[in-house]
């Protein structure tokens, strides 16, 4: 999986197509990611203490990794990624402009 926590991604399919967001959490075994502001769902919360009211909270739900692309700031769009080895570090690069992501 080429997408990591903290990356900026662009959604390429589904109801949120075209939106961008930061990856909050990655689930590698399920091949899903949690993206900020994308695939929002409503959850009804019970009151915690007596006298407190219940509430409806909007939370992001995980989406499949194949529905998102890494966002390149230079190209200003979602791009395919590759790898380059610089010294002893492996760096992700944009396939279009060859710059580091």
Image: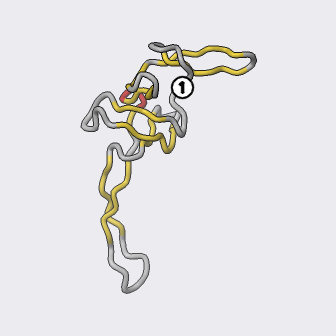
Q: Residue furthest left?
A: 15
- Where 90 falls versus 25 (above or below)? above
Where residue 64 sits, quadrant-wise, is top left
Residue 2 in percent (x, y) is at 52, 25
Residue at 38% over, 32% down: 10
Left or right: residue 77 compared with residue 2: left
Judged from the image, the secondary structure of the residue bearing numbered disc 1 is: loop
Residue 13 in percent (x, y) is at 29, 29
Where residue 84 sits, quadrant-wise, is top right
Residue 42 in percent (x, y) is at 30, 56
**Residue highlighted by disc 1:** 101
- Where 86 falls versus 6 (above or below)? above
Residue at 36% over, 47% down: 37
Q: Residue furthest bottom?
A: 51
- Where 32 falls versus 81 (above or below)? below
Q: Looking at the rendering, in which quadrant would you find the C terminus?
A: top right
User: Foreground: 42 or 35?
Assistant: 35
Residue at 32% over, 44% down: 39
Residue 51 in percent (x, y) is at 37, 86
Left or right: residue 26 compared with residue 55: right
Task: Judge the density around disc 1: few (<14), some (14-19), many (≥20) Cα neighbours within 10 Å.
Answer: some
- Where 86 falls versus 36 (above or below)? above
User: Foreground: 2 or 30?
Assistant: 2
User: Foreground: 94 or 28?
Assistant: 94
Q: How many marks?
A: 1
Left or right: residue 28 compared with residue 71: right
Q: Residue furthest front?
A: 74
Residue at 38% over, 49% down: 60
């Amino acid at each position: 999986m080429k997408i990591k926590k903290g990356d900026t991604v662009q959604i390429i399919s589904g109801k949120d197509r075209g939106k961008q967001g930061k990856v909050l959490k990655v689930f590698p075994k399920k091949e899903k990611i949690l993206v900020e502001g994308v695939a929002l769902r409503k959850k009804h919360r019970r009151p915690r203490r007596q006298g407190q009211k219940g509430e409806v909270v909007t939370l992001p739900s995980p989406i499949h990794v194949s529905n998102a692309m890494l966002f390149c700031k230079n190209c200003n769009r979602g791009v395919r990624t590759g790898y380059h080895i610089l010294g002893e570090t492996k760096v992700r690069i944009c396939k279009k402009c060859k710059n580091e992501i």
